[in-house]
Image: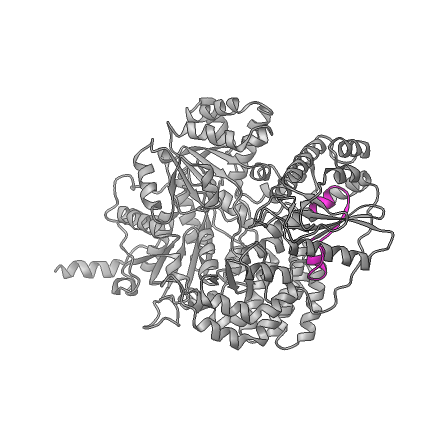
Amino acid sequence: MDFDRLSRDLETGSPVEPRELYEQLPSKAAGYGYLRDVQAQILTKWHEEKRAARDIVIKVNTGGGKTIDGLVILQSYLNDGAGPALYVAPSNYLVTQVVAEAGKLGIAVTTDPDSLAYRAAEKIGVVTAARVFNGRSIFSDARPPGTRVPIGAVVVDDAHAAVDTIRQQLSLAIPRSSNTFDDLLQLFKTDIASQAPEVLLDIQDNRGSGIARVPFWSIRSSIDDMRAALRSYVPANEKDFSHEATRDVLHLCRVVFTRSAVTITPPVPPIGRISSFTSAAHRVFLTATLADDSVLVSHFGADPALVSQPVQPISAGDIGERMILAPQEINSTITADAIRAEVVKLSASVNVLVIVPSDRAMEQWPTATRANADNLQTVVGQMRDDPKFGLVVVANKYDGIDLPQDACRVLVLDGLPEAYSGDERLESLMNSSFARVDDRQIQRIEQGMGRGVRSNEDHCVVFLIGRRLAQLTVDPRSLERFSPATRAQLKASRAIARQMENTPLSRVMETVQQALDRDPGWVRYAKSGLRGIAPEPARISTPAVAERRAFDRVLLGDTSGGVKLLREAAASCDDPKRKGQLLEQAGAYVDPVDPVQAQQLLALAREDNIYVLRPLSGIVFTPLNYAGSQADIVAARLTGMYGTPASMRVAVENMLDALVFDPLRTDEFEEAMYELGLFLGFNSQRPERQLNPGLPDNLWALEPGRFWVIEAKTGATSEFIAKRDVGQLSQGQTWFGNHYSPTDVATPVMVHHSRKLFKDASAIPGMRIIDERVLGELVASVRAYSEGLVPTGWSDIAVVDRLLEGHGLRPTQLEARLRTSTGGAI
């Protein structure tokens, strides 16, 4: 034992300044001798400006060396006596990568935070986000058994991915297969019936895709019975502790039923349960693609004042080269299947990764190797080892996959990321604009496009398949929500697309080949587009900050303070839907102490957002009137709805994408029908959603005294129209007759994939059908009409009038499209 050496080490101490620390790492691997310029910029700014701060946001593009920055920052904190230090990675696969990177740097790490080496601040702990953020976290005071593991300094890598983990782990989803689902449905069925009686019947029959909420006043009155039901819940996965995560905040949760599951979700994640994380002296969030920094406040409880001042490199253009193409935007006649066929051909010479939104969408790629949770790490390894491994498809996996260089030269996003749980779908409907795209989708798209470029020396071609996805990348409202570098690449790719407008797919593929073959002209153009891009300030939403602060106050017993914060945020909110959501939450918080005020707030919320709960009273019926001359209304209305023709095309594609017979998207269909009525210049309403249960799904006022009463059965799977469905349409007609003038005429319209009535059903007088043929023709006409509006906009009423007539969208022309039913009772 060399005691003299120990004495010298004690006297000199370990370096704290990050560049000096990096230089003195004793056993760096070859190629790790020096920090890259971007890494040095980040570490210097952190050390000189942010080191003492509690919450620190570091934004670096994918491939900018975030892992090394994070490890050096944690080692510096350890050397400064601010340990223990924890590195949080999104997945087990990325934990392995962080450990390997630490080994190349000569930084000591451990994957066991319970070890003495971690607790004594001798090694940096490396764990997954799921291990930190869960209902039985070892970093929590509620840890059973044993004392919680402390955290002095923590780095959360890919904070955007950790947000998704927090959402999943700190809320509860109980599948229909569990007896607890049945117990809760039985407990709340009367309350659900008051909000959505037809959805309740569908859930009981295990059909349809409706969303049914439990009113917050019902949760209040039945909270003890609800707790008793949940005590018997045993999750299928023994590592699922989400039922424990929601236990202390159950009275504040939102409860949503679908036919497949019931979700129990707090207003914001109860991050305070992770005691060591909330008490850590330093919390560093690393992110490349976080367009909306508000989630760091709402989900991690970070200080908004500190989040608003991120550490960023001098230039935001340090990113890999990408040619991003949406062939269907270049030429509207190009089909998705044709693009897929060309991509399959490319996979014979280069590796291709396809990301689809769902398992069902994987069927569109029958020849691809399927990667899932069980084999993902193996498949990724094979793609890394073999540059001609070929075609791989993965579902709903937009992060956590690193495919540098030849591991992936072509990346495909096939379809827009979707929300799946009942609560996610409700959240999307409550917050969506006419474009029906939220920040979470933008974030997933950007994450997905980053899987194929892992450094600024990497390159990849990205295909976007699907009209919604194609239009999204040119809409100014959505474009600004991407990171600066991705936005620049999208604009550059859009310039290429304009040069190829209306060219055949074969020409598009020739351009793709130029990028893959490293055409010098393309390389120069791609790099010049990234030159001089300045980083942008953080984006923090006032409502998101108010939601986090209000939740924390209510938990501390300050209900009035929490309600005040939400009401103030709602008063200053320009977005009506967001305003309604804030007011509903304020009502939920105040309900236990002042139920009358809660209902008053809910009535106000309902005026701005029809997706909030229906109050016990206070909804005023206002008859739907004829809007006026169709072309005049279009010319006056569309600017307010969409802003620009480009934005209109995005919104219309989103609307048309929802106009499908899909058992999983029935609510989305009804919302799209509502939007379609407005888009065509009619007055439109959703009586059941806006007024009371049991009313028509949609109501259109087409001409003076002429209406459509619409019952949508797009979730039906039977080959026949059921008696119950016809009965609902009849009930809607009766309601119309009781509330409108005797001179008003309503056509009863059933949206159903079949025209055939079941043997015990009888068509009501005047009943007409929108079946798959009619719906398909209508969608095609509306798409062509929207494309016709783009060149000149809608300011010229004569042009609008001509387009409506030419595409068969006049009221009489629409009426002529409808079909009659067949069969049924004699």
Residue 533 image offset from top left, x and y in percent: 52, 38
- Quadrant (top left, top right, bottom left, bottom right) of the N terminus: bottom left
Asked if residue 740 lies left or right of residue 160, the reply is right
Residue 359 horizontal side relative to residue 34, left or right: right
Residue most extreme to the left: 1
| Res 599 → quadrant | bottom right
Q: Considering only vertical position in the picture, is 43 above or below 211?
A: above
Position in image of residue 267 (x %, y %): 55, 64
Q: Residue at x 33, y 32 (%)?
A: 387
Q: Name the image quarter holding residue 585.
A: bottom right
Can residue 80 be seen here? The reply is: no
- The quadrant holding residue 223 is bottom right
Task: State yes or no: residue 367 in magenta.
Answer: no
The count of marks equals 0
Residues in magenta, as a range: 675-697
As displayed, is residue 399 above or below residue 569?
A: above
Please check the rendered image and state whether residue 692 is part of the magenta-colored stretch, yes or no.
yes
| Residue 610 % position (x, y) | 68, 58
Residue 166 vs residue 744, the one in the foreground: 744
